[in-house]
Structure formats: structure tokens, C-alpha cells
Amino acid sequence: MATSGGLPPPPAEPEPWSERDFSPITLFLRHQIGITLEAHRMGLLQARLRSRLQAKGFRGFSQFHEQVLRGDPTGWGAQLLIDLSTVNHTSFFREPAHFTFMAERVAAWLKESPAGPIRIWSAGCSSGQEPYSMAMVLTESLAGAAAQKVEVWASDLSLEMLKAAAGAVYTTRDVQGVSPARLRRFFLLGRGPREGSFRVVPEVRDLVRFRHIDLRNSVWAVPSDLPMIFCRNVSIYFSDEERQTLLHRLAQHLRPGGWLVMGNGEILPEVPPFFRKHSPSLFQKEG
Ligand SMILES: C[S@@+](CC[C@H](N)C(=O)[O-])C[C@H]1O[C@@H](n2cnc3c(N)ncnc32)[C@H](O)[C@@H]1O
């Protein structure tokens, strides 16, 4: 017989699309994907995810969690969360001094061993502007020999970004900072349905090879013994501990004397002893 002081009623189902409805997603992000977002980024993700899920007919975050993430924690649902929670801001020739530095170093290395190829990696390449900027600068400085002398490797965690990068099609806004001379030389103007868009020319595209790599993982499908790695504006997503692990692993992919280029605004709390700091964003591996 039920008593008046019996069991409390079960907690009410969370309101669809509410903060409480979102909480299994926050836990999934933290434990399965390893991403902890600041509150404002979490709010942004919530809004973006809601509109994507509503378009697919879902009726709440927890329904998505139950029906998709629970059954397949590495499938399309997880990839969607990764794509929506990473900040992909980038631009052509961002922090231009880095590209000049790279071209000078490549010229010096090719003097030492003219056969090449010199391999450079853009780790966290977003939608491709960074590796294509590298390839354009190298095409300019190597006057017709770039295809034999250099390879640009490029990787990202986000499949959506990699797809955009491989497509190499950009908007007027994307190419705003590109000089008219480079625009003429390195981009094809879209026609018909692609009117108003700019596609990177095959000569530059062919220098770049894309890979899907999570820099939090320990195995990376890129060559080691590299002379230079750009890993700019990526470690902002990492905790201090993860950042230290990242620096160790990047160092393992550099040859002695090789260079790590980071974003100008990235503050490293601690520079590991195997790197010599030349400027706030340029680090050389000892050796
Ligand atoms: C702000 S963008 C920087 C793009 C470019 N490096 C630049 O500086 O212009 C950061 C990129 O890092 C990628 N990223 C974030 N976490 C990553 C991880 N764990 N492994 C690989 N890429 C990651 C994001 O998907 C995003 O495309």
C-alpha cells in the first residue's frame, strides 16, 4: 500500500533543447572527444547543434545522444560535434612574416641538398588557406621547380574543414587579403554557378597533401624528420598538460635543428628544454 511519505516522483524529463537536455552532450564532449569548452563557446555550439539537429528532425539534444552518440560514439554524430565545436578561423597569408621565414629557410636547405624534397607540415590547417599560402610562396620562390623540390603536408581534426580545404574554392571575402598579383597568378575565377568564387590553381593544389589527424592522438600519419612544422592557433584548444604532450610529439616529428612555428598570440606557459625560443612564435629543436 502506498504511503503518503512514499518514493519521490521520478525526475521530470528535461525540456527539449534546454540546458539540462544538453548536459549528456557536454559529458560526451569531455569524456569521449576530450574537448572542454568555455561557456561562451559551449553556448555557440549549443545553438549551432540545435539548428543542425532540428533540420534532421530530432526533437531534442538527449534524443540525439540516445539514438546516435550512445550506439556509435565515433560515428557521424561525434564528427558533427567536432566540426561544430572547433573554431576554424584562418586566412591566406595570416601572420605573413612566417611565410617569408619559411621561404628563406627552404632556399637555404635546398642549397645544402638541392635534390629535395623539403617537406613542411601545416598541422591544424582548417579550410586550407595556410597550406595553400605556403605552397604559393614556395611556387614563387622556386620558380617552376616547386613540384620537384617541396611537399606541403596538411592536416586537421575536422573532416568538414578538410573537405573544404581539398575543394580549394574560396569566396571574395576569403581572398580579401590576397594581393592582386597573387590573385591573378594563383586563383581561377569561377564561372556559371561558381561565379564569384575563386579556386586555387592546380599547380599550387598539387603541392599539398591532406590527412585527417587528431593531434591529441599519439600516432600521426605524416613523415618524421621534418625541417619545419606550422602548428598555429591550434593549441588554444588544449589544456596545459595536453599542450606539453603536443610539443613533445611535434618535436619528435622535427629533425634536429628543425623549426616549430606557432601562432603569434599563443602563449606557451612553459617551453620544453628541447626547444630554443627565437621569438614568441618561433621555436627551434635543439641539435
Ligand atoms: C583557428 S584554426 C587555425 C588554422 C590555421 N592553422 C591558422 O592559424 O590560420 C584551428 C584549427 O585547429 C583544428 N584543431 C583543433 N583541435 C585539433 C586537434 N586536436 N587535432 C587537429 N586539429 C585540431 C581545428 O579544427 C581548426 O581547423
Image: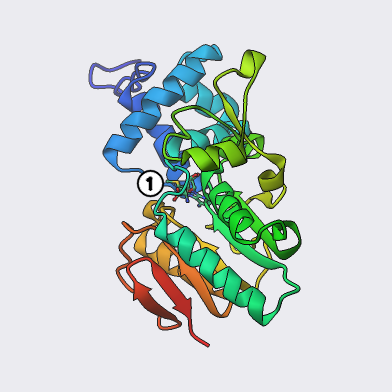
Query: What's the residue type where badge 1 is placed?
Result: Thr
Is 148 in front, or is 214?
Answer: 148
How far across and how far down the image is residue 137, in percent?
Answer: 56, 55
Looking at the image, the residue that sits furthest to the bottom is: 287
Please tell me how many numbered marks the rendered image carries.
Answer: 1
> Is 212 drawn above or below residue 115 in the view shown?
above
Looking at the image, the residue that sits furthest to the left is: 5
Residue 104 shows in the view? yes
Is 165 in front, or is 202?
Answer: 202
Q: Is residue 210 left or right of residue 265?
A: right
How far across and how far down the image is residue 89, in percent?
Answer: 42, 40
How far across and how far down the image is residue 64, in percent?
Answer: 52, 24
* Pointer 1 local density, CA inside 10 Å: few below 14, some 14–19, many at least 20: some
Residue receiving disc 1: 36
**Which image quarter: residue 241?**
bottom left
Is 168 in front, or is 18?
Answer: 168
**Which image quarter: residue 283?**
bottom left
> Is 92 drawn above or below residue 252 in the view shown?
above
Q: Secondary structure at mark 1?
A: loop
**Which image quarter: residue 258?**
bottom right
